[in-house]
Amino acid sequence: MGYRVSQRQTKVKRMEQVIGIIEDIVFRNEDNGFSVVELREESTNLEVTAVGNFPFINPGERVRLEGEWTTHPEYGRQLKMETYSSVAPSNLVGMENYLASGLIKGVGPSTARKLVETFGLDVLDIIQFNPGRLKEVEGIGSTRAEMIASSFSEQKEIREVMIFLQSYGITTTYAMKIYKAYGKRTMNLVRENPYRLAEDVTGIGFKTADRIAVSMGIDMHSPYRVTAGTKYVLSRAADNGHTYLPKGELMEKACRLLSVEETLVDNALMSLALSQGIVMEEREDHTAVYLSAFFQAEAGTAKMLRDLSSEEISDPVRDMEEKIRRFEKKHDIRLAGRQKEAVVQAMQNGVVVITGGPGTGKTTTINCIIELLKQEGLSVELAAPTGRAAKRMTEASGREARTLHRLLEYGSRDEEGDHFQRNEDNPLKTDAVIIDEMSMVDILLFYHFLKALRPGTRLVLVGDVDQLPSVGPGSVLKDIIQSGIVCVVQLTEIFRQARESMIVLNAHRINHGELPILNVKNKDFFLDRRENAEEVLTTLIDLLTRRLPGYGDYDPLKDIQILAPMRKGMVGVNHLNTELQSVLNPPASFRKEKRYRETIFRQGDKVMQIKNNYQLSWSKPVSVGKEDTVEGEGVFNGDMGFVQDIDGEEQTLTVLFDDERTVVYDFSQLDELELAYAITIHKSQGSEFPIIVIPLVSGPPMLMTRNLLYTGVTRARKMVVLVGKEKIIGRMVANNHIARRYSGLAERLKVAYGMKNL
């Protein structure tokens, strides 16, 4: 106990001191730590309101506050806190309340009562210095005793780190992220090299790290600073999908960021090149500057694709026409000409790309290829970039499909840290791999995948090149197609059954720059015309709560998904999730809740995993109705599920993903989850939903594009409902802007095949 925070005084004030128990946190700004708290003053037993910057405080905590009494025009008398310190509770009731507050993991109200009954006011000393004695308390074993002691120790460390970081202007939210990244080493690492924050901690930009460094006395012209800033510009470019930047553009951005001369940036580039942090490559009209990892991935991908596609098929399948006829007869279908061509090419080439829009028969083509490969006695692996895409592939093929990460056995299983266990030294033992939703695969993932293939492995890449590009850097599918080197078959014929769907018809119309056909009676594609964002929001709520469930007995949580172009605004994802939660899963006495930053997670909430976590454990029943379970690791960006339970004492939240996998999150991991009543169209890639609803209001032209609308529409299986103005649809269809990505894979493939020089 006894941590102290000071706020700078701008004038001499008459300081008052108050000691009491925090009863409630009325308001907390998670970004800067500003809070309004209610505490019970010990000397008077009166309730006191205090305001100030409390970087880390919890209900039940005993604190000493110093500050100035003020009178708020609306809220009355308040203590404007200048300094505070945490002090140990002075009586048994206070101690029990403190322990029961949820501050210490593993201690809830009942355990708190037992601890105080056993150890009295010495309980905190016992936890800190002699945790083995905690086992004297009924219900506490070795594991739980260790958990309690570890949590208490961590709370102390967190306070120290908070105070240290906030002295450099770092907000509470980011201070917690930094502590999560570095733990006990936080203060030492930040003092050693504050610029590492920009690389290591998501959301911490160079400017924040730079501000800390400057406050520590690092000169703005320091080569160390300029090198860090230049590398940061390249990292930001990768976040925007680029594998490299032209040197001129890089230098311009770095000079603007750092406010230094070009000479210093040029020197930094030379230093980074010598240390192999970057690679500079001369092109016909510019110098390309790569972070080394992306250069290696791009060059390696080109070489390995060349080797795979150049591999001669030792025993090409004979009698292809007859084998395809037998497949058609068996499944009572008829393949189109392009489908047959795709099957033949896949059987006779080392690498084939199959691309096409919805309704063109990609799934049927894949199934035919699988069946013919199996007839030849060849083993086949199916893969997709996301869990939901893999699940769809499994359902469509009747064979297990895995995520690429799971196929490559990504994880941290030894001292080397996170890595792909399948690689050139431990390749996949398969004769062929088929990857679906290839447009979502970035250059780094594809490079690691290719490294895990044995020479002679057949590779079939399937995807819709007109979908949104991968979130990660590169334009892999597009570049492979544009190179003209690898065999590409484009499926163009829309099948009769698919043509009956306005979803499929309109998706192709949008893709061709034509307006969709709207509101055809007894069809599946509708526009609900609304004039402004307020009307759109009201309509969305009505659609989910009344109209659509009444129309076809649809479950508003499982069957209907709102896909929004934007995150911000009245009908952006952030606001929509708050509004929809309040009507679809409102507060109730029987629903447990946990507030995490600005989000309230509630039992029954629809949620999404927003980052890949390959170490998160899950369990699922072996089969329906069986108690036996199978366990595994890995929860992936885009996985969706429902909150099953929230345990305040254990500080855990349980999610059931896709009605099968149960995952238990520690409260500290809740930044990996967000509400998913509404999700962005970008996040919907690789997924399908029975009904999708898309709000359409004015937004940035760079975002409101044709391929965004196309991607959103193609996520629906049964119905599309657009809500907004028809002219917004027209603007999006007309806006064929596709942000340019600096990527050298297409050119590199041509070089690898001897077609040209860089």
Image: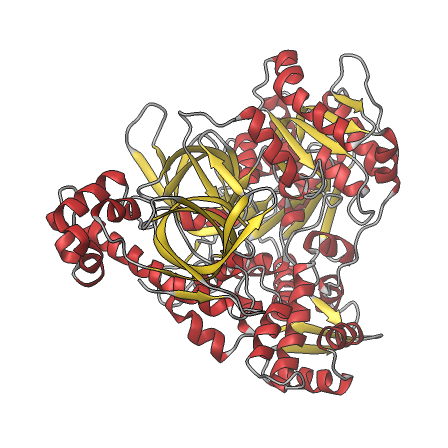
* Residue plotted at (58% across, 22% down): 556
Q: For this rendering, which residue is in front, 215 or 150?
A: 215
Relative placement, left or right, of 658 versus 337 is left
Q: Nearer the viewer, residue 219 or 675?
A: 219
Q: Residue at x 16, y 61 (%)?
A: 130
Is 673 positioned to the left or the right of 96 in the image? right
The quadrant of the image that shows the C terminus is bottom right
* 262 vs 600: above or below: below
**Picture coordinates of residue 655, whole percent (x, y):** 43, 36
Where is residue 645? Give x, y as percent. 38, 33
Which image quarter: residue 714? top right
Q: Is residue 558 left or right of residue 665?
A: right
In front of the other: 140 or 339: 140
Outermost residue, left direction? Answer: 136
User: Does 395 sit above or below residue 18?
Assistant: above
Where is residue 316 drawn, in percent x and y?
61, 47
